[in-house]
Image (cartoon, grey):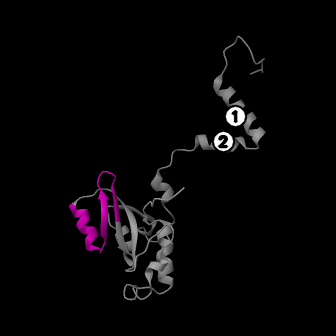
Amino acid sequence: MKPGPLFSSKPMRWGVTLLLVLACSASATGTMLSDTVSVAQTPATILADTLQTPPLSGSPATSKIASSLQRVVQRMQQDGVTADNVTARHAETYSTPLVQVDAAGRVQTAILVTTFDAQVESALTAHQVTIERANAQAHLVQAWIPFDRLTTVAALPFVRYLRAPSYASRR
């Protein structure tokens, strides 16, 4: 297609024009056009896909645990914290801005589940999970899980993912 004058009686192809405008503005700001195009062509990503991290221990259940939770538990285990000495080792000191750990060594988590009913609730409590609140419609359970049971809970068939709850924060 031969470039013509800006004002013409011929119909314009807006897709090409928009691309040219983007290219000109991108080169003026120093942005690469390929970045702009690749973002537009990238398929939508589901939130759960962006949250998953590569497993540290290689177990399929570990891939369902957020890396922030994994790092805290790994640090506790490396420091020799066990279910027997958790109180004496002051487990709450392992809390981070993202992950809360209480004195009993329980980690506050948001459990994304496929469903929430009485059977799911009893299965979680059987694994010493203390449920704070549950939203069956959102498929979300906020609970405290003993640090040494995160992988066991993640392996339950109705658990999709374990992550830290979203805490309110000041701007």
Q: Secondary structure at mark 2?
A: helix
**Rendered location of residue 117, percent (x, y):** 23, 58
**Rendered location of residue 149, percent (x, y):** 37, 75
* Gap between marks 1 and 2 measured at Cα: 8 Å
Looking at the image, which residue is at 64% across and 24% down? 14
Quadrant location of residue 36? top right
Looking at the image, which residue is at 73% across and 44% down? 32
Q: Secondary structure at mark 1?
A: helix
Q: Are marks 1 and 2 in contact (CB under 8 Å)?
A: yes
Looking at the image, which residue is at 29% across and 54% down? 136
Q: Which residue is mark 2?
A: 36
Q: Which residues are magenta?
A: 118-142
Image quarter of the N terminus: top right
Indicate whether residue 146 is drawn in magenta.
no
Amino acid at the residue labelled 2: Thr
Comes first in the chain, label 1 or label 2:
1
The label on residue 22 is 1
Amino acid at the residue labelled 1: Leu
